[in-house]
Image: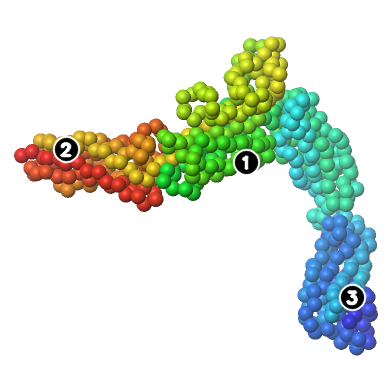
Amino acid sequence: MRMGKGTGSSFVEGQLQIAVTSLSAGGSTSVTATLVDANGVPYQQSVDVSFTSDCVGTGNATITSPVTTTTGYATATYTAKGCQGTDTIYASATVEGATVTASGTVSTGSVSLGSIQFVSADPAIIGLKGSGLTETSLVTFKVLDQSGGPMKGQTVNFSLSTDVGGLSLLPASAVSGDDGTVTTVVHSGSVHTSVRVAATVDNTGVGTQSAELAVGTGLPDQDSFSLALGTLNPEAWDVDGATVTATAYLADRFNNPVPEGTTVTFVTEGGKIEGACNTDASGQCSVTWTSQAPRPADGRSTILAYAVGEESFVDKNGNGVFDDGDSFTDLGEPYLDANENGSYDLGEFFYDFNKNGVRDGPDGKYEGVLCQHSTLCGSSSTAPIGVSSVLVMAGSNIAVTISPASATFANGASTSFTVTLEDVNHGVPPAGTTIKAEVSKDKIAGPSTFTVPNTNGVGPFSFGVTVEGDGTASTGLLTITVTTPGGAVSYGSASFTEQP
């Protein structure tokens, strides 16, 4: 088996058939490889033919590959995208265990500058100078010719939209490579700000600007840290495997998202929870809580999320740093407040930030990157921060109490009942539990159906039902039907008498 161009006696082995061998910038041509047997007859079995070229390898041209043929002729389309001068095109295939090849050349005319594009800034958020976080961002642009292909050898000059706080970049200019890309590095300053990089091709009016980079502390601060539970009172007391999404939201003291990859750690009093997550570009991440043992005696499970961050302060003089005259919120090490009394009790879990084996309370000093106070700067520029939420592991068996248990009212008047629902732990029923009120006579004034809300409030769930007389003296029954999301049904009833 052989590869080349032509057939029969005109077959030329090792050479590709190229329709147009001299291309303008951005031009295209067909390239055909012919597979023949020893007699020059086209090969009629299915074969995949691969095409490439030197410029395809550098991204300065494209070619169709692979091409499947059952006729012996494989035709690809070659397009110059920044390729200049002579380019060698190669074709190869494996037929009946043997590899056959062919090649050919095209020449392309000179290309003209088209545009320059912003590619990326990595990372898009950098820490203030001296913060100990990533303080540089690699900013990449790409120079393109008029055909849209990469253009090498172009000098690109860079500049910043601001140099406040000592922002800088290096290098100030660069030459585009084979793939048309150029890069520069932005170095952070000492002031929180946003900045863009302008890139202009030398001695031309062709330029563009990067997306915005943020310069901040890069650390979450306490008052920009929150925790949200998808369901606050899931049906979880009697069921293993019920799940709730716990999402942490973090921002720095300027309320910009923390850098992607910031770690948040979780612990739970009851059930189980995934141990940690890393924030995305928006400054949030989620883990899953799952119902199982242990189950706290009161059915209330505190979940604590904590991270390395800094304390929050009020910048009274607006200079962007914590200095004399400013106030701050002094923190102790975060702890899991299992009994919800608002203070740490011996035996409760705590985040031992300094690893001294004891839970440390507030120390009277400000711990944060931006501390310039004459007397109140702590020994560390970071601090442990935490936030918690309570999840009610609601039971499926609901006790229904109606007060009063019986009522008498005047003919044509009305009477009101208070309905109280509680699970085995005297807590709120599961979120989404539905309640239906029905009467055997007269009618219900106002709503007759209710739904337990998403809540972690302490104690049972209560609501009122009013029965309105119809002017007929008789006795009736108010019936309450409670159905949890899991299908458990509970009932309660009270009687009422409409007098003559």
Of the numbered discs 2 and 1, the one sitting upstream in the chain is 1
Element under label 2? strand
Cβ atoms under marks 3 and 2 closer than 8 Å? no
Left or right position of 409 against 76:
left
At horizontal 79% and vertical 67% (from top left) the residue drawn is 64
Element under label 1? strand
Instruction: Please name whichever residue, 437 or 109, is drawn nearer the observer in this view of the structure.
Output: 437
For residue 446, say whether it is visible.
yes
Left or right position of 411 against 75:
left
Neighbour tally class for label 2: few under 14, some 14-19, many 20 plus, Cα within 10 Å: some
Residue under label 1, please give it. Answer: 277
Neighbour tally class for label 1: few under 14, some 14-19, many 20 plus, Cα within 10 Å: some
Rendering coords of residue 470 (x, y %): 12, 43
Amino acid at the residue labelled 2: Ser
Element under label 3? strand
For residue 283, say whether it is visible.
no
Residue under label 2, please give it. Answer: 406
User: In the rendered image, which quarter contains the N terminus?
Assistant: bottom right
User: In the rendered image, which quarter contains the C terminus?
Assistant: top left
Disc 3 to disc 2, how far (Cα)?
A: 97 Å
Residue under label 3, please give it. Answer: 100
At horizontal 68% and vertical 39% (from top left) the residue drawn is 261
Question: In terms of image quadrants, where is residue 72?
Answer: bottom right
